[in-house]
Amino acid sequence: MALDKRERIIENLAVASALGLLALVVGVVSFFADSRVAAEERAALAPAGASIALAGRSDDPTFGRFYLIQADSGPAYAAVITLRSAAGSALIAARFTPRGEVMDLRFLGSCASRLSQDPKNLALDFPDVDEVLARASAQARYMAKSGTEPKS
Amino acid sequence: MRERFVPNPIFAGLVGICPLVAASRSLAEGIVYGLGAALCALLLGAVVPATRAIIADRLQAPATIALSAAAALAYASCARAYSPPIAAGLWIYLPLLAVSGLSLSTLRRSSTPEGLGPDGSSRFAQVALEALMFLLTAAFVGGFREILGLGTLTLPTPGISPARLELVDFAPARMLVSPAGGFILLGFLVAAYRGMVRARGRSQP
Amino acid sequence: MNLLASAFLWTVHSLLLSPLGLGSLDILFFALLAVPLLKFVARAASNAGDGLLLRIGANADDLLVGSLVFGIALISSNGGYALPEALAASAASGLGYWMATVLLESIRERLELSELPHPFKGAPAMLISAGLMALALMGVDAAFVSGVAV
């Protein structure tokens, strides 16, 4: 009886360790995939001749990373925002001033949608785009105030 | 009276195809989703029979579900790295590959002790054939829906901007891209397949 | 089952996974923790009751490992919902699933008695009916629910 119990415990521990190893493998794959996505985002966001650095991360499902761009026109925060609706999905590059104002929106790519490439028409296909941009603006403002620079 | 309001469990099977209909809105999404389901099924078909001898019966179910979930998560990460817009379009349906109809049927098939199917082929060969058919179906349904619905064809190219072929300059039937349209189109496709098979004089599926 | 699963995953995601930066592993933890727990609850329901509870407990086993329960749990945890919103969403989706299956069963009974062309009998007619019902619900969502939310 005691042997059975001990065998069960060992069995449970063995399976738990195997599952922990599985979680580790998934974590490692996610890490490398995330790095690749970050590199693509940097390439898409940074204009020629500007330096770009990771400013912070967010828990928001529509934008994960915020970047700080130091360009000739001045510092700015940028993020790749993911929009999804029944019309399809789209990625847009958004730049914000340290005060959280939207500087510009640039259409990057889309899937399963017939969108006009003009960011002004985004609200037609993605009704929640204003809400998403408001959240991103708030994040930029927060980062500007709590980061080292720039502040305004 | 009470019986009328308790749902028939047969319709749980219909729920199983919801992710396929919802995910395959374009050729690119159909291929990526179908490939993910196929790869998860192949992994389960290869690993689960081998673990039957190692893992106790009471731990089989959680271990195999966890393996399915891990495979789905790993594939979702890779899909996100391959093409962010396609992965964004597939949304939660990539992690839900863990419990796709194909994964669950592979798990059920792999948990039986028989190594060979009724026609003598190995169980893994059956799983592989099922996985291939699922991939082709998802790609076909996705492509068909996109052509009829949007008049375009999105190719599963890597990067932040998938290549798109514009076949006509308007969206013929945009409703087909929605899940409702997907169900309707699937119904007509199944009916068309049955009509073809009947016309050739074979028995109905 | 939906409520339980959603509440459990929301709690695990908010209190354990997100603070540790493991949010992307939510479905793995869900499979490991919630599925055995909910299977136990389903078995308890089928053992404790008779008639309705017995049938619910028996069917819950199949419905549990399906995209409905996992899907709504993922939507709640990844969509940044608060706990009351997650519970409301899971309850509403469960009610919606129940309504859809009851209506589809009625439609199925009528279709069996109808004279349909042979290729459309069975699954094709059911799929087209489900699609038309989904279309109607999309219209209700756009016309009434979205208006309420705004």
Image (cartoon, coloured by chain):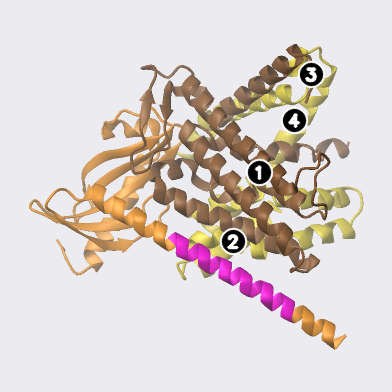
Chain colours: A orange, B brown, C yellow
Residue B28 coordinates in the image, percent (x, y): 46, 35
Which amino acid does the dot numbered 4 rest on? Leu
- Confirm whether residue C88 shows in the render: no
The range drawn in magenta is A10-30
The alpha-carbon separation of the residues under discs 2 and 4 comes to: 34 Å
Residue at figure coordinates x 68%, y 72% from the top left: A15
The alpha-carbon separation of the residues under discs 1 and 3 comes to: 25 Å
Residue picked out by circle 1? B128
Mark 1 residue crowding within 10 angstroms, few (<14) / some (14–19) / many (20+): many
Residue B168 coordinates in the image, percent (x, y): 39, 16
- Confirm whether residue C55 shows in the render: yes
Give the side of residue C5 with respect to residue A36, left or right.
right
Mark 3 and mark 2, same subunit?
A: no
Q: Are marks 3 and 2 in contact (CB under 8 Å)?
A: no
Q: Nearer the viewer, residue A145 or C134?
A: C134
N-terminal label among 1 and 3: 1
Residue C103 numbered tag: 4
> Is disc 2 placed on a helix, strand or loop?
helix
Residue C28 numbered tag: 2
The alpha-carbon separation of the residues under discs 4 and 1 comes to: 36 Å
Mark 4 and mark 1, same subunit?
A: no
